[in-house]
Image: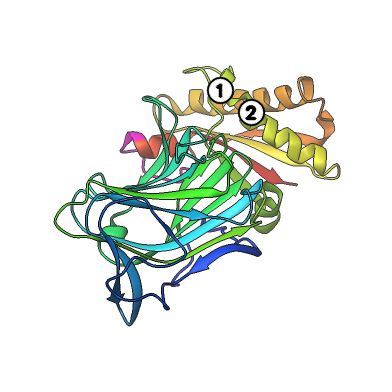
Amino acid sequence: MGEIGLNYDFIPGERVLFETNFSGAVVGNFPPGLEFRGGELSVVSYSGGRALAANSTGAFAIELPENLPERFTIEFSLFNAKGGNRMRVEVVDGNFAPLGQHFIRLEGYERRTGVGAYEPGGITSLQETTIINEQMTPIRVMVDGTYVKVYVGTKRVANMPNADLGRSRSILFNFHDINNEPAYITDIRIAAGGRSLYQALEATGRVAIHDIHFATGKADILPESFETVGNVAKLLQEHPDLRLLIEGHTDNTGNFEKNLQLSTERAIAVKTYLVETSHIDATRLQTMGLGQAQPTATNDTEEGRGKNRRVEIVKL
């Protein structure tokens, strides 16, 4: 698998709900075990094995033996040939309509992968991932309630605590805008279980949370972040011996000292919310503002600055 990235904290689900590598499928046919939903999809020989090739816009569905649980993982390998190819992985209802407000998004044209939103202007978590346009690459999705992480190879490209993927027995793999060269997919595995927020904290000692948003230049927590802070409260409620340091981080826009003060105030604001709204014992929480001193991405782009504006929780 190569060198493990700093943020690679994926743990596959333990109980398999569906798994295939198309090894028993006939080349040239649509494979058994999937539900054909249109397009030009057929099994091909690929690198000594088998893969499903999408030669035009189309889709297939996987029918699971039960509804997706609260925690689950999706794994597959994808080669999304250079061009405009796009792919979505969606949880759908019995009529194949999306159940949630978000889906797993893999772009050829925009070269981005992560969690996308259906509604215009909706919250997304995406990163550039050109490797899927160059070679067959493992894609992994880890879901814990509304918390969704997406990994390309050993790089975490999405870290979204307030995504709504929905829950059902049906998952739709939807290929569209296929141009010039097909997209290839293989090694599909869907399983119940996976890593919880607590397990991630236990494994690494800290977790970065990018979806606690504040008013610009202030320490006022915006309403759309209440659910995310609530997930931290739930973590503390379920583990009464857990104590946390709440760190505030900013990008490098503006004055260093002001950013340091702002990050401190924002960390305190999260603690105050946990104490006053969720009734967490204040003695279990400490705060620290680090301003722009510990960036995790470049400050030369808006996407990078967005990653640097974050709250981190650290196990004490």
The amino acid type found where label 2 is placed reads: Glu
Q: Residue at x 38, y 40 (%)?
A: 304
Q: Quadrant of residue 168?
A: top right
x and y percentages locating residue 200 in the rendered image: 65, 53
In the displayed structure, 46 sits above or below 224; it is: below
Helix, strand or loop at label 1? It is: helix
Q: Nearer the viewer, residue 246 or 160?
A: 160
The span picked out in magenta is 295-302
Residue 40: image tag: none
x and y percentages locating residue 230 in the rendered image: 69, 30
Q: Which residue is mark 2?
A: 227
Q: Which residue is mark 1?
A: 224
x and y percentages locating residue 225 in the rendered image: 58, 26
Q: Nearer the viewer, residue 36 or 13?
A: 36
Q: Are marks 1 and 2 in contact (CB under 8 Å)?
A: yes
Q: Is residue 219 visible?
A: no
x and y percentages locating residue 212 in the rendered image: 56, 29
Locate residue 312 relative to residue 274 in the image: left or right: left
Label 1: how many Cα within 10 Å (few below 14, some 14–19, many 20+) = few
Magenta span: chief secondary structure: loop
Q: Is residue 2 visible?
A: yes
In the displayed structure, 146 sits above or below 214; it is: below
Helix, strand or loop at label 2? It is: helix
Q: Quadrant of residue 191?
A: bottom right
